[in-house]
Image (cartoon, helix red, strand yellow):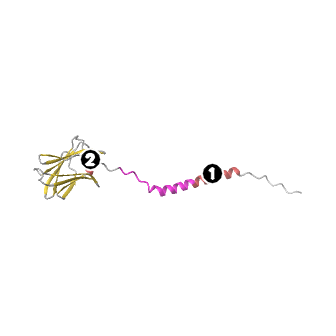
Amino acid sequence: MYYPAPPPRRDNLALIIVIVVVVVVLVSVVISAILYIFVSGLISPPVPPRPLVVFGLVEMTGGNASIPVVSTSREIDPSSLQVRLMANGSGSSKSMPPPNGSVVLPAGGYTLRVFWLDQDNNQVFGAGDALRVTGNLAPLPASTTFALDLLTTEMLAEVTWTTQ
């Protein structure tokens, strides 16, 4: 009378390998998800660089000033622009005038006009266009220092000149 032989041992090696692989994959997925949640708040879309504008030399004609736009890094939507005109240290600003139109700006005790000359008639501000500064239906006042600034949320370009 012998004890019955124990049943043969089953080899669970394949099952253990499958479980280990599943655990490793799950752990890496969970860690990746946690890292994504932490880092995704730091990722933001790139901020486009501010446009660059270069004014040319002020040309005085008939007592009025013309300021050519020599170059721009890109064409600019005029609704995002403002012009600021200073005369003898005081002035005001307004939205960009309409293409081939003007805005009236009080500056230094004078009423002045700023015109946007959209030379290529494309309705966007860019190279080849010009700004013209005049008195209100008269030439600019004599012996006056002027400054014209082109603004968005920050300064894009500035030009200064003095009348004779």
Q: Quadrant of residue 23?
A: bottom right
Does the stretch in magenta take in 36? yes
Q: Which residues are magenta?
A: 28-48
Under mark 2, the amino acid is: Val
Q: Tell me the residue at 77%/53% (across/down).
A: 9
Q: Which residue is mark 2?
A: 54
Under tag 2, what secondary structure? strand
Q: Which residue is mark 1?
A: 21
Characterize the local packing of mark 2: few (<14), some (14-19) or many (20 or more) Cα atoms within 10 angstroms.
some
Q: Which residue is at the far top?
A: 120
Main SS of residues in magenta: helix
Q: Tell me the residue at 68%/53% (across/down).
A: 16
Residue 22 in the image: state x and y as whole percent. Answer: 61, 52
Residue 19 in the image: state x and y as whole percent. Answer: 64, 53
Under mark 1, the amino acid is: Val
Does the stretch in magenta take in 130? no
Number of the front mark, 1 or 2: 2
Q: Which residue is at the far left?
A: 138
**15 sits to left or right of 123:** right
Q: Which residue is at the far right?
A: 1
**In this orientation, which residue lies closer to the viewer: 93 or 86?**
86
**In this orientation, which residue lies closer to the viewer: 119 or 39?**
119
Q: Is residue 42 above or below residue 101?
A: below
**In this orientation, which residue lies closer to the viewer: 151 or 27?**
151
Mark 1 or mark 2, which has the lower sequence index? 1
Q: Tell me the residue at 70%/51% (across/down).
A: 13
Q: Which label was assigned to residue 148?
A: none
Residue 89 in the image: state x and y as whole percent. Answer: 19, 59
